[in-house]
Image: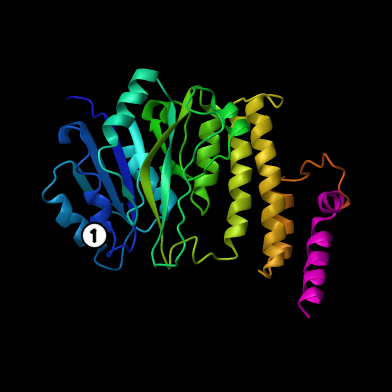
Amino acid sequence: MTEKLLSIVVPMYNVENYVVKGLESTISQGLDPESYEIIVIDDLSTDSSLERARSVAADHPDITVVASDKAGIGETRNKGMRMATGRYLMFLDPDDWFEPDVFRTIVEIMDQQNLDMLNFSYRPVEELPTGEEWCKVWEQSTGERIITGPEYIAGNEVPSMVWSYAYRRSFLVNNDLWMQPHMHEDECFTFCALAMCKRIRHLSLIVYNYLRRNGSFMQAYNPRHTLDLLKAESNMINYALRRGLPVDSLAMRMLQQRKDALIWSAVRNAVRKGYGIESEMADDLKELRLLPIANPGHSLRKWIFNRWPRFYLHGMKLVYRIKRK
């Protein structure tokens, strides 16, 4: 059996109005259809997503559609990863789509330069006309030179979305990299992969179109997702420790720095927006051993937060309540 060059994993749930466009974007890609595969895992959709995906797959034997039990996006992606046979692996959210003729370029670059990961540019697209043109092209400060994952974190504003990278599948398998079964699974997976990555570069080519649609996860953010974010950061640090990364290594320093900055921002934002989960956040911070966060500027606020997180969070809640009056 000839090895597939590329596997595309597509987790699917209730995207009947988008999935056909997403899957059709994987078809005209400049590669022999027999050299790559598209694996669609349906997470028990309640609309016609499954039927529409199967309709597209009926004319394209390189597309496999699997009906699965409800498992959430993390485990749905894992199921697709376990089925994948390609040398390289990419992800597609089914309400997004690829640019034409990009797969060949990605495979050739990763082959020629022996990369573990390749980060590429993407185009955010608003679902409804807003009068605003929003296209963030990722032109990284490291340019297109090949560096390690920790160096990449240190030198860039790094996107956490798993679909903004191509991965060597053996690299993921050898480093036991899988999605976590909760929201913000990208946060953990991407940065764990970067921590272990020996060769990565950026490709200044728009490969992916990311649709910001009404009703999506990020547009309908649940306050409790902040708690999932804390779990993701804890899992990220625990993974690095299990893999034996030295505490003083660049990889561990970059992960700790990201963890501290994200926690400080997330918990303050949750209080500011009135999510009402201050006690739960304080308990999780303690249980997950996420404190103390770094305090290089000797901030009094961070000092109080590190010592008495519950007191600090409820104090902030009172301050913002007074400000709103």
Residue at image position (53%, 64%) is 221
Question: In this rendering, is residue 203 above or below 207?
Answer: above
List x then y, in percent, for residue 241: 63, 31
Task: Inspect this view and state whether residue 84 appears.
Answer: no
Most extreme residue toward the left is 59
> Mark 1 — residue?
50
Residue occupying image coordinates x 50% and y 40%: 189
User: What colouring style does the render use?
Assistant: rainbow
Query: Residue drawn 41% across and 29% down?
Result: 173
x and y percentages locating residue 163 in the rendered image? 41, 44
Q: How many marks?
A: 1
Viewer-nearest residue: 40 or 295: 295
Left/right placement of residue 184 relative to residue 317 reads left
Q: Is residue 324 magenta?
A: yes
Q: Which residue is painted at 80% across and 56% down in the image? A: 309
Queried whether the magenta region covers residue 216, the answer comes back as: no
Q: What is the chief secondary structure element of the magenta stretch?
A: helix
Magenta stretch, residue numbers? 301-325
Please tell me which residue lies in front, 151 or 231.
151
* Relative horizontal placement of residue 299, taking residue 265 as reference (left or right): right
